[in-house]
Image (tube, rainbow, N blue to C red):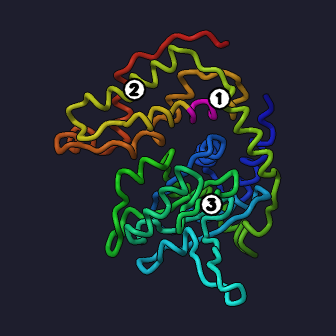
Amino acid sequence: MDNSKALSLIENIEKVIVGKHSVIVRVAAALLTGGHVLIEDVPGVGKTQLASSLAKSVSGEFNRIQLTPDIMPSDIVGFSMINNETHELEYRKGAAFCNFLLADEVNRASPKAQSALLEAMEEHQVSLDGNTYALPSPFMVMATQNPVETYGTYHLPEAQMDRFIMKISMGYPSPEEELTVLMRTENDNPVKSIGAVITTDDITDMIAQVKKIRCTDSIKAYIVAICNHTRNDENLRLGVSPRGSIALYKIAKAAAFLNGRDFVTPEDVKAMAVPVLAHRIMLAPKGKSEYGSSENAVIAALDAVAVPNTPNA
């Protein structure tokens, strides 16, 4: 097992994104599971910079689509048109045909446009006019949304939220970190100064390595117990789905890989539980006063479930 290329990817992104090591690690973990990430935060904290830095660090194809209410599904998945020379239908690819798709302000797109992402995210393919077109591999969607200004936006349905392997938040930088940001952007956008440090083949190889990471039955049962606790919590209206437990299982393996281990520990599970599970649950009215947020509900589940004793092998 060699995680040196993954660490070089993280280091390269940190040349642009200051003071957000844990956020970058989470995005890298999602990449190594073939998952998609929803970045939710206020404007101007680096959401788009993070996605652009990841894409530029890999020698793959990057597309960005600025989602607005007038965006059509065909802008995402493509469309068919008559070729004037052959007089036959010809397929023109949409923005989804890339390795990294940045769906900026995804909640500003109409539900019809949002749904166009579902098949691409889940099946890594698009279907049009009776034909199926495979997307490049690897394929990752990084969507951003602003949780504060909701006028003129369309709430993401739970079915689509569940497609994201994790939801993360950037948060404001500290004064010292913000000073570093100012210095780095004094001459130009620092994203322009970085280049690719790994290839798409490297990602494919690391994804295969992550799948081979060992996970004991007791840790698998620990993951299931955490998710099951949310389903039986009277303070929650919606608990974590089985897709959520699968996601946490995959991300825990990726976390172990990034930590240089070939086996999963309970700490890997606990470190990734909140970003992987919080967006998959809904608070009941009582839960809003009890927990305040879905993140706190996941923390409560972690506190309530016994941590297994596992050998480091």
Q: Determine contact: label 2, label 1, CB under 8 Å.
A: no
Q: Which residue is mark 3?
A: 133
Q: Gap between marks 3 and 1, in whole Å? A: 34 Å
Is residue 169 in sight in this rendering? yes
Q: Which residue is mark 2?
A: 226
Q: Position of residue 158 (x, y in %)?
A: 35, 51
SS for dot 3: strand
Q: Determine contact: label 3, label 1, CB under 8 Å.
A: no
Q: Earlier in the sequence, mark 2 or mark 1?
A: 2
Question: What range of the chain is rendered magenta?
Answer: 250-256
On screen, residue 190 above or below 273: below
133 part of magenta stretch: no
Task: Work out which quarter of the rendered image holds the C terminus and state it.
Answer: top right
Answer few, some or many: residues within 10 Å of disc 2's Cα (few below 14, many 20 plus, some between 14 and 19).
Answer: many
251 part of magenta stretch: yes
What's the residue type where badge 3 is placed?
Tyr
Question: Residue at 44% of width from left, 37% of height from top?
Answer: 244
What's the residue type where badge 2 is placed?
Ile
What's the residue type where badge 1 is placed?
Ala
Question: Residue at 50% of width from left, 61% of height from top?
Answer: 117
Q: Which residue is mark 1?
A: 256
Residue 70: quarter of image: bottom left
